[in-house]
Image: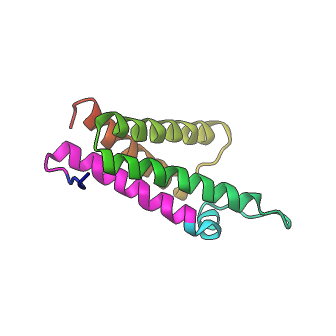
Amino acid sequence: MEFYIPEETGELLAFCAALLTGVIGLFGLFAPRLTLRLAGLSLAGPSREGLAFARSAGGFRAGLAVVALLMAQSWIYMAIGGAFALAAFGRILSLMSDGSASPGNLAILAVEIVLAGLPLGYAFGFL
């Protein structure tokens, strides 16, 4: 199996979204304390379950991105886009019901929308 870098614009944008997903995932996997701090979260007490959760979530994102980068199939890009679309939907629900509107939260929402839109746009033929 050889590594494939797309030449078509839409697929390249989806590829870049998968690449960024992998970077975010690796960051969470190998720097969970910093990831939690950037998210505005802190560990309570001597328990380390929060670190395990951050590493696990990072590993999940990194694993999904690696498969997308290696397989280069539109349905895998669709999975990444769908995951980020639901993450953005959850963030919007939080903005509306939890009163969590802040510049940082809105910036992360914008990133999630872009990371959802690029792969979904390619998978559904809009890009």
Tell me where residue 84 appears, x and y as whole percent. 46, 42
Q: Main secondary structure of the magenta part?
A: helix
Can you say whether 17 is above or below 37 in the image? above
Can you say whether 42 is above or below 68 in the image? below
Residue at 44%, 35% in the rendered image? 82
Judging depth in this view, the residue of 5 and 86 nearest the camera is 5
Residue sitting farthest toward the top: 124
Tell me where residue 103 appears, x and y as whole percent. 52, 57
Judging depth in this view, the residue of 79 and 100 nearest the camera is 79
Is residue 96 shown left or right of residue 14? Answer: right
The magenta stretch is 6-29
Is residue 95 shown left or right of residue 72? Answer: right
Instruction: Place residue 46 in its image quadrant.
Output: bottom right
Q: Is residue 14 magenta?
A: yes
Protein image colouring: rainbow
Q: Is residue 127 magenta?
A: no
Residue at 65%, 62% in the rendered image? 40
Is residue 123 shown left or right of residue 103? Answer: left
Number of numbered labels in the structure image: 0
Residue sitting farthest toward the left: 7
Residue at 67%, 54% in the rendered image? 53
Tell me where residue 41 appears, x and y as whole percent. 69, 61
Residue at 65%, 69% in the rendered image? 33
Can you say whether 45 is above or below 6 in the image? below
Can you say whether 36 is above or below 120 in the image? below
Taking the image as drawn, is residue 101 in sight? Answer: yes
Residue sitting farthest toward the right: 45
Figure quadrant of the C terminus: top left
